Image (cartoon, rainbow, N blue to C red):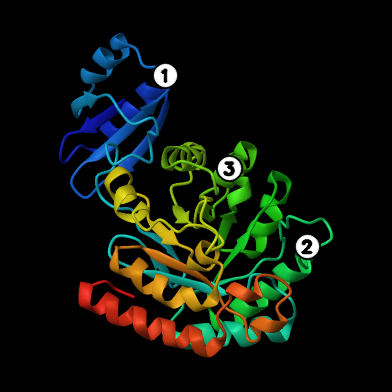
Amino acid sequence: MIVVMRRGAEKAEIEHMAQRVESLGLKAHVIVGEERTVIAAIGDKREEMKESLESGPGVAAVMPILAPYKVASREVKPESTQVVVRDLKVGAGSLGVIAGPCSVESEEQLITTARAVKKAGATALRGGAFKPRTSPYAFQGMKEEGLKLLAAAREETGLAIVTEVMSPEDVELVAKYADVLQIGARNMQNYRLLEACGRVDRAVLLKRGPAATIDELLLAAEYVLNEGNQNVMLCERGIRTFEAHTRFTLPLATVPYLHQKTHLPVVIDPSHGTGHAYLVEDMCAASVAVGADGLIIEVHPKPEEAMSDGYQSLNLEQFAHTMAKCRKVADALGIEM
């Protein structure tokens, strides 16, 4: 249920109603909007609870949440959420760009990339320290040493750090170094990991699984939100279909559809979504055109020498050209980039 407070409701009234929600055995999520404050009451819904809450001080209305995902729904928060981490702004009219190598390989590789992507306009650096690979024999990442290099790159450039966390046990370690915790496509329904990320003070970038529906993605986000972490970004990185001309099929209709259903910002990953570097620039521009709130792009100084995903990574010059093209589209649409 949603407890909608009257305009101008006092702080004491809001706190009182949140406590009443909790006393009924429900979980209270206080969400402050531009015009009103609402309290999402999550749990077993019974009619007598609705009547009890309607009589509370400062309450304008109590309404059911129809969507299966509760806190992520626009029913709860009509205004778009903006996630802000250092200079990275994603959502609510701002388009953030996250760029960097698939894997952290060396200090020289990472610092060179970080300087170049910042110069071109990126506000966050991506890089994998822990790498989930299909083959157990493939490069698995530099782990904590890679995290230390990412932190050094942040110190050098000021870029926010986005990196993947693979297990609940690693959340505290990765959060020690990173600004944004990325939950990869393989882990979208790792519910213990989602809950662990919901309990730390770090933004979360949640990638859609290659066979997941939109509702399943939103319900996965709900696990993070339900633990109290409201700084969640959804990421469309392509789904698996019968087509073979790209690594995955990148459905850009996801962006406007999600904007209708959720207040959470939507980031597009054209690198994994296509699997071919020569397609990335056009798909970035198309993503901006359909209203994406962010881009996450694989960039490497020498893609042909990359230890992972070199075939879908832009080189530094290509990234700068891509940013210039995207900026033209953003300017035409009045989007801050």
Residue on which disc 1 sits = 23
Find residue 93 and report its horizontal and vertical position in percent: 27, 65
Q: For the point 37% across and 23% down, which residue is it?
A: 21
Badge 1: how crowded within 10 Å, few (<14), some, or many (20+)?
Answer: few
Q: What secondary structure is marked by label 3?
A: helix
Q: Nearer the viewer, mark 2 or mark 3?
A: 2
Residue occupied by mark 2: 140
Q: Earlier in the sequence, mark 2 or mark 1?
A: 1
- Label 1: which secondary element: helix
Q: Amino acid at mark 1?
A: Ser
In the image, which disc is placed on residue 78? none
Label 2: which secondary element: loop
Residue 11 lies left or right of residue 28; in this view the side is: left
The residue depicted at 28 percent of the width and 39 percent of the height is 11
Q: Is residue 318 left or right of residue 173?
A: left
Count of marks overlaid on the render = 3
Q: CA distance from mark 1 to mark 3?
A: 26 Å
> Most extreme residue toward the right, as rendered?
137
- The kind of residue tagged 2 is Gln
Considering only order in the chain, which callout, 3 or 2, is on the residue closer to the N terminus?
2
x 47%, y 74%: residue: 279
Task: Estimate the spatial distance between the alpha carbons at disc 2 and disc 1, rounded to whole Å.
Answer: 47 Å
Q: Amino acid at mark 3?
A: Leu
Q: Residue shown at 46%/78% (left/top)?
A: 122
Query: In the figure, is residue 190 to the left or right of 21?
Result: right
In the rendered image, residue 81, in percent from the top left (x then y), is placed at 33, 53
Callout in the foreground (2, 1): 2
Where is residue 220? Give x, y as percent. 50, 40
Which disc is residue 194 wearing? Answer: 3
298 versus 255 height, above or below: below
Residue 71 visible? The answer is yes
